Amino acid sequence: MPRDFFQTSDVARLIGMPERRLIKFVESPGYGIKPSLRVKAGKGAPRLYSQKDVLSIALAWWLFQSGFRSQVIGRVLRLPAVVKTLLASSEWNAETASHRYLIVKREMAAEEPPNQEVSVVELEEAFAAVKSTERHGFQILPIGSLLSLLWSKLRTTGE
């Protein structure tokens, strides 16, 4: 049975990210990442993360690795459709997961922040979106496969 809460070192190991980067994610307001439980305030106090927190941190890490800035990552993490996708991913089988892609479509415009759309779609829909526009940039992440691998680690942690 998977554990309910994880410490910072556990989360970093599960996701495969440096622990100091995870701490920066939590301490930087742009990401909007907070531990579910904090035993006490101050340096050295353990931060405890739920499974939902781990999923959000993993997505933040993958977006960071793809070149996104903290404010963009924070906006993506706060989208209801993204939260719903992260939670629903626990029910996906390997076949279903392999067909899920997170698409970030950003308008190439002078205004800040640029118009941005985020969706989770199948690969064919992602290709159709890319073909249908000339003034947008796209980032496509294989979110299903990434989450499937993470869930397999979460399910075996604590056994």
Image (cartoon, helix red, strand yellow):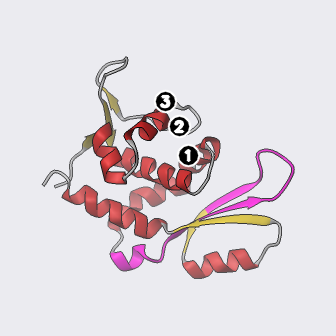
Q: Residue furthest right?
A: 110
**Horizontal relation, residue 90 to residue 64: left or right:** left
Q: Residue furthest left?
A: 159
Distance, label 3 to label 1, CA atoms, is: 17 Å
What amino acid is labelled 1 in the image?
A: Arg
In this figure, which residue is indicated by the disc labeled 2?
32
Marks 3/2 in contact by CB < 8 Å: the verdict is no
Select label 1 or label 2 by which is in front.
2
Marks 1/2 in contact by CB < 8 Å: the verdict is yes
Magenta region: 94-118
Distance, label 3 to label 2, CA atoms, is: 9 Å
Could you classify mark 1 by the number of other residues whose Cα lies within 10 Å: few (under 14), some (14-19), or many (20 or more)? some
Q: Residue at x 38, y 80 (%)?
A: 95
Q: How many marks?
A: 3
Q: Residue at x 40, y 56 (%)?
A: 87
Marks 3/1 in contact by CB < 8 Å: the verdict is no
Quadrant in the rendering for residue 124: bottom right
In this figure, which residue is indicated by the disc labeled 1?
78
Relative image position of residue 155 (x, y in whole percent): 23, 59
Looking at the image, is 44 positioned above or below residue 37? above
Distance, label 1 to label 2, CA atoms, is: 8 Å
Give the mark nearer the N terminus: 1 vs 2.
Answer: 2
Give the mark nearer the N terminus: 3 vs 2.
Answer: 3
Could you classify mark 3 by the number of other residues whose Cα lies within 10 Å: few (under 14), some (14-19), or many (20 or more)? few
What amino acid is labelled 3 in the image?
A: Glu
